[in-house]
Image: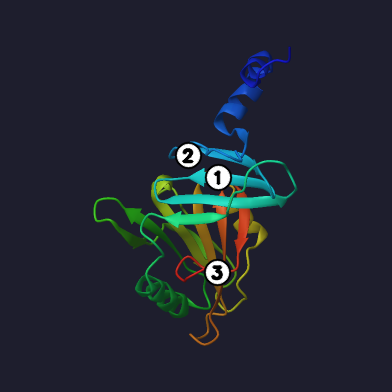
Amino acid sequence: MSATLSESLNASDPRDAILFGQTPLVPMPRFGALPTLEVGRRRYIVAADGLYLQARSRVLSVTCRLAEAVTPFGDLQPRIELVGGLIPQALFAQIAQHALKYSPNEWACLIHWNPTTRGYELSIPEVADSGHGHITYRTDMIDQDFLVLDVHTHGRYPAFFSAVDDRSDERHGCYFASVLGRCDSQFTLEATSRLVIDGAFIELPWHPWEDA
């Protein structure tokens, strides 16, 4: 008789057992449903059309497809849910104003969810160094469980995620990251956004302050 999954895990290297327990890989049921993912947890799901990653923080719940495949398992749809809905346009307008004001220097801010006021708030992180082509700032001032958006500008340069940005986003967490570029005027301003899940990057064709 073949061993059950739990028996196999118990017989495996304990380091693998910890990894599988923290980030399990599960098939998507065809006729039933998976239990709701708990806050702070992650899991990979093999669905009918490929491999998905699910993650949940206190403010963001994500289901995204990482790779295509054909399997006999159930259907699953990509989904992103924010506890407070999209970031208000008025808040993004503040970000855009600061981007133009500080250009050609780079600038940064963090958007988090305040569970007391039940609203989004903008905070300016402590900046270690900044200039026309770089900015270094602290992100530990905000509880990662309530972080919604980490955004910085590229001054007059285009909006893109650099290798430095990738290294900065390798930290643990589930949040949006955006870069604003060509900050000469509101007519040239551009943006690029992505989801960050524990160092994994999912590019987005939209931004968390606009309808998908």
Q: Amino acid at mark 2?
A: Leu
Real-space CA distance between mark 1 and mark 3, rounded to the nearest whole angstrom = 19 Å
Q: Which residue is mark 1?
A: 54
User: How many labels sit on residues?
Assistant: 3
Q: Specify the quadrant that holds the N terminus.
A: top right
Real-space CA distance between mark 2 and mark 1, rounded to the nearest whole angstrom = 8 Å
> Which quarter of the figure has residue 101?
bottom left
Q: Earlier in the sequence, mark 1 or mark 3?
A: 1
| Marker disc for residue 37 | 2
Q: Classify mark 1: helix, strand or loop.
A: strand
Q: Nearer the viewer, residue 137 or 12?
A: 12
Percent coordinates x, y for residue 153 in the rendering: 52, 70
Label 2 with label 1: CB-CB less than 8 Å: yes
Q: Which residue is mark 3?
A: 206
Percent coordinates x, y for residue 85 in the rendering: 39, 61
Percent coordinates x, y for residue 16 in the rendering: 66, 24
